Image (cartoon, coloured by chain):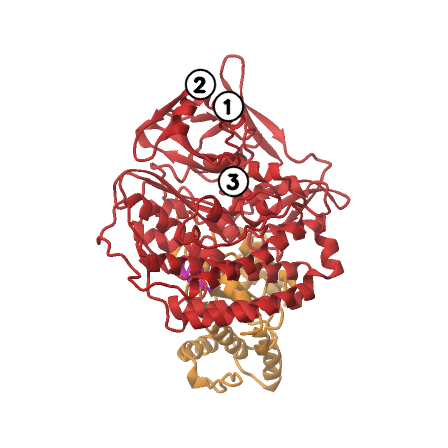
Amino acid sequence: MEMTKKPKIKGMKYEDFNDNEYLENMVKELNANGVNVLVGVLDDVVNWGRSNSLWPLTFATSCCGIEYMAVGAARYDFARFGFEVTRASPRQADFIMVAGTITDKMAPVLKRLYDQMADPKYVIAVGGCAVSGGPFKKSYHVVKGVDQILPVDVYIPGCPPRPEAMLYGMMQLQRKVKVEKFFGGVNKKMSQEEYRRILREQEGMPSPNPVAAQAEAKDKE
Amino acid sequence: MDIYEKITALVPGVRLEEGATPTLYVEPASLHEAAVALRDHAELQFDFLRSLTGMDWGEEGLGVVYHLESTRLGHQLVMRTATADREHPELPTVCDVWKAAELNEREVYDYYGVIFINHPDMRRLYLRDDWVGYPLRKDFDESEELNPIRMTNEESSDFTSVYVKDDQGHTVETKQVLFEDDEYVVNVGPQHPATHGVLRFRVSLDGEVIRKLHVHCGYIHRGIEKMCESLTYPQTLALTDRLDYLGAMQNRHALCMCIEQAMGVELPERVQYIRTIMDELQRIDSHLLFFSTFCMDLGALTAFFYGFRDREMILDIFEETTGGRLILNYNTIGGVQADIHPDFVHKVKKFIAYMRPKLREYHEVFTGNVIAQERMKGVGVLSREDAISFGATGGTGRASGWACDVRKRHPYAMYGKVEFKEIVFEEGDCFARYMVRMKEIEESMNIIEQLIDNIPAGDYQVKMKPVIRVPEGRYYAAVEGSRGEFGAYIESRGDKYPYRLKFRSTGLPLISCLDTITRGGKIADLIAIGGTLDYVVPDIDR
């Protein structure tokens, strides 16, 4: 299925973005898995609102954090694009900019912050360290890429990335948000069965036995 | 050499080792006694522990190198001690002599597994308690199976171990309580907007009064020192910028200087001029960021935008010449990466002319504000003795009346030839620390103004051999970083890789005095105190 509607970002043409194929493939894949993407006007309205008020978590571990602050300050000013304020509490944040190296000791803390955020939530890996371990790839105490512990939506390479690169990466995230379906169930990017199984596993419950589940369903009928 | 002869005569149990760097060797048994004598003897007065480095000498065993200095008499000393036992290495603590040793010895324990007898708090400093092995030992097994990424939440124990000697000379481990059951303990960090990074405190409160505070580091411990041991000298330079990223120029300057001094490289004057100007620009950059973030912590958000707006001008100047905004990679061994941009001089002058009135505006906007004054004056007082004992250099030390500026103590680059005031305050409170940094911006501009018009012509890079080898020996060089003395210590065995490379962190002494200065204060003042100490966490954890 073709992508029927292209996500619009004010002031920048669709063709000017890199990685458009990725977005198209993502939509294709979601469609193939039975998730309807881009259903209607209502979704458009919701996604317009969501993508233009993505609030980041105040989270930075090292150098990239300073550049990230510069993006928030007067010259680059990410509030222009709707990122408005950083939130110190994960409960109020929409996405994490993982700005800086994640060490082994920090990994569970970051995971916990991610778990504390409310759905829908996104992750941007900023800088070489968060993308792959960067200059510290050989270290004994550095996580080689934050995607080992979190699902990452956008990668911004650089050491540290320029503020413009960060803005570009954040706009890519907006585009990703714009093609997502919001109504009729949360788009988890996975099938319902898989999602339920993961939820059960997280709560420590055993995976449902398919035979028993079927029997139960029959009883109800 | 005088001082070494004097010491061997005055202090019992020490031996002088000649070599590229004369070093005093002390047997572990007489270490504590020697340390007390070194500090207290009227002719020695070594009251400042500059740096404490753990070492793995292979066959000789594990040990520690101490860099000492006397703040009154000005002389310096390198001292070392070693224990051959690799299974159960033990050394006596010196943290009752120099308070700076407290966290540093915990670092050595963390890196090498050396247990310090009588140390009041023998826990790991950076790594998790369930970490297997000691990473900086030469025989450390780095395999992922031993230390996978542990995704379980970390347990913070309320107990610590203290090792003491019993009557028969056996080492006995005793458990000490850090926090009693009925204490009200609040956790701050590692994800907290006012800790300036991923630092974590556990604070015991009585109402809102702080009873004690424990610092937890290591959330951004990247193992830089271990990595450096397998990198060639030019490669190690790349990591210095990422330590204290607001002192990128100065950090790299320190390491380059250390290697150049070891190899005996003479630098052209042009390089010295450029390095000095760049260091000072970096200092202004750092202090502007300090102003921005500190004011933001105290609730003055406007100041944040002001500071960042003006800081961008310096970043533009950096970018034109070096190509980087934050990570600059500019200094090299024997020079600098590239010649200064043709617009450099003009832009620097323009910036200085722009900055002076802006500083007045800062003072009008924030310094004179009643709320700001109330929150800073008399809060978090650090005495001069404590500042020296903890080794809290930089603006923090100078705010407590300790003239500790490396630029004055051991002039390097062009600092011996320019005139500038060392800003020293006596109060030691948050306001003094804040004012030191604001005044230093002015002094830095004065220094730049003296140099900017006279940059001599010449090469910007000395021709070096393709493979750089540092002659065998121990070398230490320090610069005045943005927030204190930043030193690089190299132990070389003549290879193209350093045998051991240690960075004297500017931030570690600053956080080690946090417990002392926050006790009895309010929890809200912790933010003001932490802000004015102006630490950068990746520099602490390294």
Residue B361 place in picture, x, y as percent: 65, 68
Nearer-the-camera pick, B309 or B226:
B309
User: Residue B292: horizontal and vertical position, in percent?
Assistant: 60, 62
Q: Examine the image and state in which quarter residue B270 appears.
A: bottom left
The chain painted red is: B
> Is residue A210 in view from this perspective?
no
Q: Colour of chain A?
A: orange
C-beta proximity under 8 Å, tags 2 and 3 = no
- The secondary structure that dominates the magenta segment is helix
Q: Which mark is residue A4?
A: none
Q: Is residue B11 above or below residue A209?
A: above
Q: Report the side of B261 relative to B91 (left or right).
A: left
Please name the residue that numbered disc 2 is placed on: B12
Q: Secondary structure at mark 2?
A: loop
Q: Pointer 3 indicates a residue of which chain?
A: B
Magenta-tinted stretch: A126-133
**In terms of image quadrants, where is residue B147?**
top left
Residue at label 1? Answer: B37
Q: CA distance from mark 1 to mark 2?
A: 9 Å
Q: Is residue B141 visible?
A: yes
Secondary structure under the numbered disc 3 in the rendered image: loop
Quadrant where the N terminus of chain B sits is top left
Tell me if B16 is positioned left or right of B185 in this view: left
Compute the Cα span from label 1 to label 3: 29 Å
x then y, percent, for residue B384: 61, 39
Q: Label 3 is placed on what type of residue?
A: Leu
Which residue position is annotated with label 3?
Answer: B125
Q: Amino acid at mark 2?
A: Pro
Amino acid type at mark 1:
Ala
| In-front residue for pair B266/B491 | B266
Q: Residues within 10 Å of mark 3 (few under 14, many from 20)?
A: many
